[in-house]
Image (tube, rainbow, N blue to C red):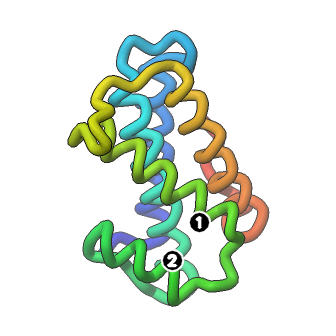
């Protein structure tokens, strides 16, 4: 099971990839932009789980359950942002809700949601959160 620093290293790695994909309004790969953004959030949350309770989710469904029931003190906007990113990532990967092609607005929305998660992680849990 990866520890906090390993999850934060993955955050850093994924943030480098996001930079490579370009600005949200200019990226040629909005599906990957949104998906990478989601996985940055996943590793941020997994770092939090490990840091707080030496805990780890084995699946997306288990992570959802933990966020809802085991971490009630997390801000509602934080949770809402995560679930929105998860939804967008599923749209990009599996054509959920018949929306397969994402656009710059989806990318900008993904960044806004990621910023909510990253802000909370940095302010409340990880002062050394990766700034890439």
Residue found at x 44% / y 61% = 7
| Mark 1 crowdedness (10 Å alpha carbons): few <14, some 14-19, many ≥20 | some
Closer to the camera in the image, 58 or 30: 30
Residue 51 is situated, as x and y percent measured from the top left of the image, at 55, 79
Closer to the camera in the image, 13 or 29: 29
Residue found at x 39% / y 25% = 102
Closer to the camera in the image, 68 or 24: 68
Q: Are marks 1 and 2 in contact (CB under 8 Å)?
A: yes
Q: Which mark is residue 79?
A: 1
- Tell me: 113 left or right of 37: right
Residue 5 is situated, as x and y percent measured from the top left of the image, at 49, 64
- Tell me: 35 left or right of 129: left
Task: Look at the image and tell me whether residue 10 can be seen.
Answer: no
Reply above or below: 26 against 79. Answer: above
Q: Mark 1 and mark 2: span between their CA atoms?
A: 7 Å
Residue found at x 55% / y 72% = 48
């Amino acid at each position: 099971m990866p520890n906090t620093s390993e999850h934060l290293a993955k955050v850093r790695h994924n943030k480098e990839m996001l930079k490579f994909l370009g600005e949200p309004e200019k990226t040629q790969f909005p599906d990957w932009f949104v998906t990478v953004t989601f996985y940055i959030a996943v590793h941020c949350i997994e770092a939090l789980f490990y840091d707080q309770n030496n805990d780890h989710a084995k699946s997306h469904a288990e992570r959802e359950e933990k966020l809802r029931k085991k971490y009630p003190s997390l801000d509602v906007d934080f949770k809402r942002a995560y679930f929105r990113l998860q939804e967008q990532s599923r749209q990009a990967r599996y054509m959920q809700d018949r929306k397969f092609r994402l656009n710059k607005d989806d990318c900008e929305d993904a960044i806004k949601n990621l910023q909510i998660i990253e802000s909370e992680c940095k302010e409340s849990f990880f002062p050394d959160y990766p700034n890439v």
